[in-house]
């Protein structure tokens, strides 16, 4: 709590410490390393929330791989999803015949990723799988397979380790629940 102490004051509780996150990401990286042997892996980072997770996860995967980036519309300054997904920045390179791993910060209703998955599958990828740091299964509105996730969390609004509220808190090294008075 010594560093970033002003940001920590806005948290109700810390859900996952940086040590727990590092451990979870390492395990996920090992599993992905096993599963993608001999495949042509492309990791896609969904900006901006997935950046710390993406940077840590790719360094836990002991395989040749390439990376690319996408921007889709998200919550903005609200904590509720609009249900509308817009592709703001597309990939730089073709994914035809590739084994795509979409890396996201959190799966909530599942609408963002189910849309993205459809878009990517339409581009003749060999496979499209999802890796998410966090998963809120109780909030799901559409059916979605999340092949790789570090932690399942209850229905609370979380920030830190890439996750924001109104573009803030992304630099917190831990994941915590934001005090409701900060966004209500
Ligand atoms: P979905 O389409 O699954 O409902 O929403 C996915 C996106 O909503 C995430 O990429 C993230 O930007 C945002 N989101 C969902 N739940 C949370 C949360 O608890 N905290 C933050 N900061 N963003 C969230």
Image (spheres, rainbow, N blue to C red):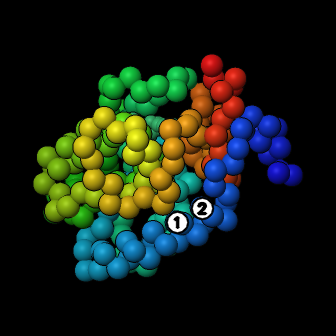
Label number found at residue 25: 1
Please tell me which residue is depicted at 71% across the width and 38% down the height of the picture.
12
Q: Is 15 placed left or right of 82 in the picture?
A: right
Quadrant for the C terminus in the image: top right
Is residue 167 shown above or below 184?
below
Please tell me which residue is depicted at 44% across the width and 44% down the height of the picture.
136
Q: Which residue is mark 2?
A: 21
Which percent across, then down, holds residue 45? 42, 51
Label number found at residue 49: none
Instruction: Give the residue at the far top of this rendering.
Output: 184
- Mark 1 and 2 residues: CB-CB less than 8 Å, in contact? yes
Is residue 70 shown above or below 129?
above
Can I make out residue 107 in this image?
Answer: no
Name the secondary structure under disc 2. helix
Which percent across, then down, holds residue 93? 27, 53
Q: Is 90 placed left or right of 5 in the picture?
A: left
Name the secondary structure under disc 1. helix
Please tell me which residue is depicted at 32% across the width and 60% down the height of the picture.
147
The residues tagged by marks 1 and 2 sit, at their Cα atoms, a distance apart of 6 Å
Can I make out residue 37 in this image?
Answer: yes
Q: Is 145 placed left or right of 56 in the picture?
A: left
Q: Front-most of 51 and 182?
A: 182
Within 10 Å of disc 2 (Cα), the crowding (few <14, some 14-19, many 20+) is many
Q: Front-most of 171 and 106?
A: 106
């Amino acid at each position: 709590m010594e560093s970033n102490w002003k940001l920590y004051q806005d948290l109700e509780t810390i859900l996952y410490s940086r040590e727990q996150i590092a451990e979870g990401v390492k395990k996920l990286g090992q599993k992905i390393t096993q599963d993608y042997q001999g495949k042509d892996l492309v990791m896609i980072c969904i900006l901006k929330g997935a950046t710390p997770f993406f940077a840590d996860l790719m360094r836990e995967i002991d395989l040749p791989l390439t990376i690319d980036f996408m921007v889709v519309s998200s919550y903005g300054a609200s904590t509720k999803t609009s249900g509308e997904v817009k592709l703001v920045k597309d990939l730089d390179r073709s994914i035809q015949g590739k084994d795509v791993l979409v890396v996201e910060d959190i799966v909530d209703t599942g609408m963002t990723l189910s849309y993205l998955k459809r878009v990517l599958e339409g581009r003749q990828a060999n496979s499209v799988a999802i890796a998410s740091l966090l998963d809120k299964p109780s909030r799901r509105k559409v059916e979605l397979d999340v092949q790789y996730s570090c932690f399942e969390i209850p229905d609370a609004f979380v920030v830190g380790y890439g996750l924001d509220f109104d573009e803030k808190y992304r630099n917190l090294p831990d994941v915590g629940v934001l005090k409701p008075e900060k966004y209500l």
